[in-house]
Image (tube, grey):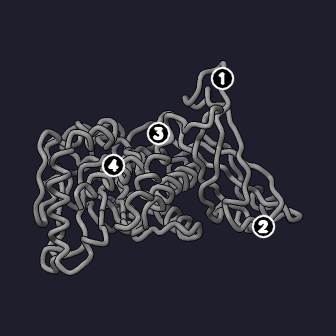
Amino acid sequence: MAESTTISNTANLMKYMKLDQKGSVLAEYVWIDGSNGVRSKTKTLSGPVKSYKELSEWNFDGSSCGQAPGDNSDVYLRPVAIYPDPFRGGDNILVMCECWDHDGTPNKFNYRHDCARQMEAHADQEPWFGLEQEYTLLGPDGWPYGWPKGGFPAPQGPYYCGVGTTKVYCRDIVESHYKACLFAGIQISGINAEVMPAQWEYQVGPCKGIELGDQLWMSRYLLRRVSEEYGVQITLAPKPIPGDWNGAGLHTNVSTADMRKDGGMKAIEAAMKNLEKRHVEHIAVYGEGNAERMTGEHETASMDKFSWAVADRGASIRIPRQVAADGKGYFEDRRPASNACPYQITGITMETVSIDL
């Protein structure tokens, strides 16, 4: 594993982690900051806590997180979901929060609020989402873990879903994150090594409506917390290494009640027409630096042109072959970058596919 600069002693830590909390619960309030990252801080409560509705609002210094000016820095945290804490165990919880300003309006980086409105407006469509989160593991020097220092490994080919030394790196981090997600109740449905060495993917979903955004963001928090303990950095950059290497995406699988019915391909084809009309609007919220990834190469479509096809990983939208055979199911939007916000993706997608349906 990578050499960490963090001073840590697991044996000593575990001695204290086993101490009785005397009925108290530690609630880790988690939020999204102004740079598309996650932050958190802890509050001691009387427990146990059964619902996020039992939790009070809290606040933080928004000027230190890029979310407010220094002369009016208070930003408020409103709990929206809770999960068991895999790091502290017991009755301790992780709390997903929305950020609100002092005047009662959503913070400008609170994309969840608009997403929830879309999900409520189109609840009759019973939307299901599944997101495939790709990410890259970096050593303390910022170079992909396992790569020769200042050099490159053998070309892509043996790494996707690979097994064995020189084929995959940091499986211990991936497995730790997988189990942490399961403990927390995240609907993580699988993992695999990706095409570029030191790159992995995990899938969250299917989840209903707003739950997907909540769970994907919490899974990102868990990934960064796990990587802390191993001294490895996580990057969600869509093109972490220039050149003949695959980028990283956040492929988005979408299904509505109409798409899941017999004859649902008609609803899918109607959605394709709507998505084509709003291609530019979608690209605008599909992640920073996505143009470096969406070049038409390395299993991507060109950012400048919308396309859809059955079983084509070079199209903007892929219709799985089994869906085409069944005549119903879901579609995969391959345009979102790995660093895109799941609330923005699912919100605009729900709005777009519901037009005239």
Dot 1 or dot 2, earlier in sequence: 2
Marks 1 and 2, how far apart at CA: 34 Å
Residue visible at 24% across and 49% down in the picture: 335
Q: Position of residue 30 (x, y in %)?
A: 61, 48
Q: As rendered, which of 294 and 17 lies closer to the eye?
A: 294
Q: Residues within 10 Å of mark 1 (few under 14, many from 20)?
A: few
Dot 4 amino acid type: Ile
Q: Nearer the viewer, mark 4 or mark 3?
A: 4
Marks 4 and 3, how far apart at CA: 18 Å
Dot 1 or dot 4, earlier in sequence: 1
Instruction: Identify the image quadrant of the C terminus.
Output: bottom left
Is label 4 in a helix, a strand or a loop? helix
Dot 4 or dot 2, earlier in sequence: 2
Dot 3 amino acid type: Asn
Residue visible at 70% across and 66% down in the picture: 89
Q: What's the mark number on residue 36? A: 3
- Residue that badge 1 annotates: 72
Q: What's the mark number on residue 48? A: 2
In the visual, does 353 lie left or right of 39?
left
| 184 to 148, vertically: above or below | below
Dot 1 amino acid type: Asn
Q: Is residue 137 visible?
A: yes
- When asked about the image quadrant of residue 304, the answer is top left
Q: Is residue 297 visible?
A: no
- Residue that badge 4 annotates: 348
